[in-house]
Image (cartoon, grey):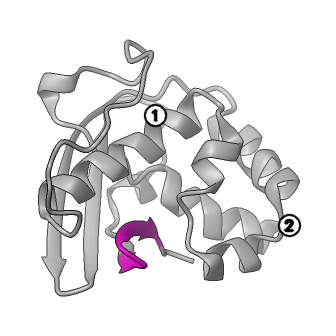
Amino acid sequence: MRKILGLAVIPLALAACSSEQGSTTETTSVVRVASSDAKSEETLKQRAHELDVLAAQRQDSKAWEMYSQRCQAQIGDLHTYSIILDEFFRGRNPNYTGVTVKVNGSSAQVVSTDTDPAAPASGMMPRTWTFIDGQWVFDNC
């Protein structure tokens, strides 16, 4: 379980949101991608933010769907993922306020800012996203 926890904690801190969108605690719905370019940097920013919002709001099954098949296989199943989220958010109040994205072809590195004082330091480490089957998926496992 410790190995799985280490794999999944990294993704959650990966948030993506601009300061204009507000914090995840204020967000009640997920912003849908407006860009017609599914592979664009802006689309990735929106997808990464969406993952953070879903995870923070404990919409586990929807967040789980944003992980690559490879990561899902490494974590195991939705139940295990939910346990990981329980641990990751225990004692936390996530507040994602910014994101930096660096796209290189079909791969990208995403770094998010979470102003929650209880956020782990690993939250500022780059996370990998990959463009697979026409959409960005979280692939940092």
Q: Secondary structure at mark 2?
A: loop
Q: Nearer the viewer, residue 136 or 134?
A: 134
Identify which residue is drawn at 75% across, 38% down. 86
Instruction: Locate residue 44 relative to residue 100 in the image: left or right.
Output: right
Identify which residue is drawn at 57% across, 39% down. 55
64 relative to 113, above or below: below
Q: Specify few, some or many for label 1: CA neighbours under 10 Å numbering under 14, 14-19, or 20 or more.
A: many
Identify which residue is drawn at 32% across, 56% down. 124
Q: Nearer the viewer, residue 30 or 110?
A: 30
Residue 131 within the segment the image draws in magenta: yes
The CA span between labels 1 and 2 is 24 Å
Indicate the position of residue 97 as horizontal and vertical percent values. 24, 32
Return the residue at label 1.
Answer: 53
Amino acid type of disc 1?
Val
Point out the tag, 1 or 2, that comes first from the N-terminus: 2
Q: Quadrant of the N terminus?
A: bottom right
Amino acid type of disc 2?
Met
Q: What segment is highlighted magenta in the picture?
A: 130-138
Residue 127 within the segment the image draws in magenta: no
Q: Nearer the viewer, residue 138 or 94?
A: 138
Identify which residue is drawn at 50% across, 60% down. 11
Q: Nearer the viewer, residue 102 or 66?
A: 66
- Write down the quadrant of residue 141 in the picture: bottom right
